Image: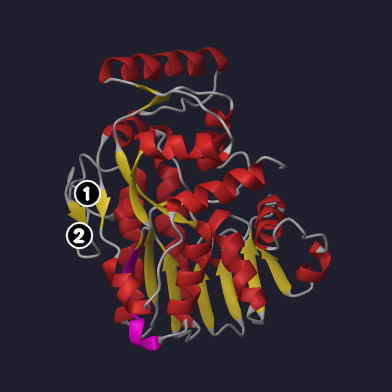
Amino acid sequence: MILISGATGFLGSYLLYRLIKEGHKIRAVKRTSSNFKQVKIAFDFMNKGHFKDFDSYQEKIEWIDADLTELDDLKPAFQDVSEVFHLSGVVSFQAKDKLAVLSGNVGATKNMVNLSLQNGIKRFHFASSISSLGRGNEAQVDESDLSTQKSSNSIYGMSKLMSELEVWRAFNEGSKGIIINPGVVIGPAIEENDISKIFRLLQKGFNYYTTGINGYVDVRDVADFMYEMSRDEELFNERYLLVSENVSYKDLFALVDAGFGLQNVKKEANDKMSRLVSLADRLRAFVTRSNPIITAELLRLATSKYYYDNSKVKKALNKEFISIGQSVADTCEYLKYA
């Protein structure tokens, strides 16, 4: 049996679909409060908008409610399991969420690793992030780059790096598997997802772009590449950077506009304007007693230029990525009717 965490999340829902399609026996861990909205979106998208029978898929999944940060709560999920895919994680760039991010990422991964080792599970696969990589501005980044710049990296990025170290411990103690470091993932997701927020903002006519460059990947590629590498032991005990292309925000926003059939003329948001927008957002958050959206970390990312080298995974699988143009077009087409 395969155990998967994060199956109701963005990446996990698409991997769950692939695992079901391959006929695996699946046990999925979820929080008691989780719903299946993202899973239904992923399955509908993969079935090209013709997915109607969710109950028939549900029969192929054993769902178990558990808190990944509570070891005793998680123990029953590991009975009769032969392989683990750990995709659950907490994403936040809010300073006040530091403890929640560390617990939800590092603490949960430590528990998943410990229970896998205690139960003699030999295969353990982990979805990390490019945020854990060392990212010198305008330097090419590959799998060998570790994040050592603690002062410039986000707490989320550091939590992912610390989580990876837990997985390497599992590999050193006898487990085998892969670690993936996806870029910014594009694909249909629930409205609360950051990429969905960006797509919807642009759909409403947002006319500015920042000067940054980042690495992007289609969610279908993340699920497919992770699954296919998990079947080949010659690729085990390695980390793989999953980025299709390095794209500027200007070009990405133009692709989204085209996907929605818009012809907006974008303006560059200079540093002064970006700081003013960030200040206005903090004031909005103060008045409404909500979290600021444009944090200092996100503002830094939006104006930084990162380039990622995907040659290792392409050589490993002899496979090309879906282009970001196609990924954006497919996502926009789905969102038009969502």
Q: Are marks 2 and 1 in contact (CB under 8 Å)?
A: yes
Residue shown at 64% from the left, 60% from the top: 30
Q: Position of residue 225 (x, y in %)?
A: 45, 71
- Determine crowd level at label 2: few under 14, some 14-19, many 20+ residues with C-alpha closer than 10 A: few
Q: Residue at x 37, y 46 (%)?
A: 156
Amino acid identity at mark 1:
Arg
Q: Seen in the image, is 233 located left or right of residue 149?
A: right
Identify the secondary structure beneath mark 2: loop
Residue 35 falls within the magenta-colored stretch: no
Which amino acid is tagged 2? Asp
Q: Which residue is painted at 46% across and 28% down in the image? A: 293
Q: From this view, report whether residue 128 is shown above or below residue 209.
A: below
Q: Earlier in the sequence, mark 2 or mark 1?
A: 1
Left or right position of 267 against 26: left
* Residue 126 position by quadrant: bottom left
Residue at position x 79%, y 63% in the image: 54
Q: Which residue is label 2 attached to?
A: 145
Q: In the figure, is residue 16 to the left or right of 63?
A: left
Q: Quadrant of the N terminus?
A: bottom right
Magenta segment: does it hold 237? yes
Q: Which residue is mark 1?
A: 135
The numbered disc on residue 125 is none
Query: Residue 159 or 144: which is nearer the viewer?
Result: 144
How far apart, in angstroms, are the residues tagged by discs 2 and 1?
8 Å
Magenta-tinted stretch: 233-241
- Say which quarter of the image contains residue 269: top left
Task: Give the structural element (helix, strand or loop) at label 1.
Answer: loop
**Percent x, y of residue 182:** 40, 58
